[in-house]
Image (cartoon, grey):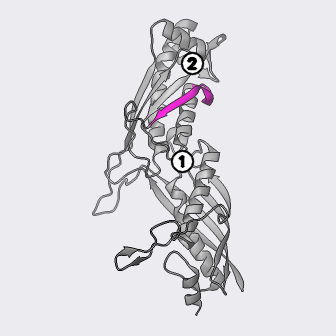
Amino acid sequence: MKKRGRGIGCNLYGVGFGFNRPDHSAAYIEVADDGTATILSGACDIGQGSDTILCQIAAEEIGISYEDVRIISSDTAVTPDALSSTASRQTFVSGMAVKKAAADAKQHLIKLAATMLECDPEDIEIKNAMVKCKTDITKSLPFSELAKQAHLRGKQFIGFAWHDNFTADVDPVTNQGDAYATYIYATQVADVEVDTDTGEVVVLRVCAAHDCGQAINPKNVEQQVEGAVAQGMGYAIMEEIILKEGKTMTPSFTKFLIPTSQDVPEVITYIVEDHEPKGPFGAKGVGEGAIIPTAAAIVNAVYDAIGVRITSLPITPEKILAALG
């Protein structure tokens, strides 16, 4: 007999290292004579898309197109330190370093533009790769021309910034304090089908609502949530380390099962944009926070389906049949 159930999992997750631990990042940005920009950042893109996000942040801050920004990342010979790609921190911390570095380079260019257009620096606007005087719309020039003139005059515009995300730990007596600079929140709902004859669990669908602050790249958020759901499902019903007399009996992926594309359920992502003033353009993060609710939602869905609570992961067919008697 096949029975269906629905379960909910919720979480909050602190972004960055927190707990009185150094948490910083630095970045350089150089504007070339053709108006393109190059970022140097130590942030390591391990598939989460931080290279794309940092380029978007720089483009938005300078006022040029994303296509005109490139990045050299995690090259220990030339890039400044950004610490590790953990704790869902690179968009939040390195993103702010890049934003500040872009603003630094931009301010030098604005001063030159003000001289060229005979306009106050406060009235210079750079948007869509055009430099304009807000008080006199007849005064404008392409950003590429501004960059060219800067180099012809012997001015090489390089911006640098360092961002510190340090937060003091909570008071050990009162448990009050600022443990993390910001938090991300999530709720996931899972629908499952349990075969009570075989104990097999099939995850049919997961709906995932995630507060990631302002979504710099919504597609990037969706792919991170989808990947996290796949990992969380593996944790819930497949991935098992078996130890016997001090030896690992699951030494390879032939024994340690992980989800394939055929196992991953339909994932419906809802992006909840709660603007975070401490982050770049209001962004926070999403990576690790997206994996936390999945197993809880699936476990609760299995309980809803069969009325028996499984208290150890993964929920294997053997455990379900034993619980059902």
Whether 93 is drawn above or below 170: the answer is above
Find disc 2 in the rendering and name its residue.
35
User: Which picture quadrant has residue 64?
Assistant: top right
Q: Nearer the viewer, residue 92 or 198?
A: 198
Q: Is residue 76 above or below residue 65?
A: below
Left or right relative to 177: residue 317: right
Q: Residue at x 44, y 76 (%)?
A: 242
- Spot occupied by residue 238 in the image (x, y as percentages of width and height): 55, 71
Residue 212 pos. (x, y %): 56, 50
Question: Which numbered disc covers residue 149?
Answer: none
Residue most toward the right?
1
- 1 and 2 marks in contact (CB < 8 Å): no
Identify which amino acid the numbered label 1 is placed on.
Gln
**Circle 1 Cα neighbour tier, 10 Å, few/some/many (<14 / 14–19 / ≥20):** many
Query: Where does residue 39 sit, x and y in percent of width and height?
Result: 48, 29
Check the image and name the residue furthest to the left: 173
Residue 48: numbered disc:
1
- Which image quadrant: the C terminus? bottom right
Pick the residue in front: 241 or 35.
241
Q: Is disc 1 placed on a helix, strand or loop?
A: loop
Is 65 one of the magenta-colored residues? yes
Residue 293 in magenta stretch: no
Give above or below for 134 relative to 85. Answer: above
Q: Residue at x 27, y 63 (%)?
A: 173
Picture residue at 51% right of the left edge, 16% below the top? 110
How many numbered badges does the structure rendering display? 2
**Residue 104 at least partly seen:** yes
Residue at image coords 72%, 86%: 1
The CA span between labels 1 and 2 is 28 Å
The residue segment tinted magenta is 63-73
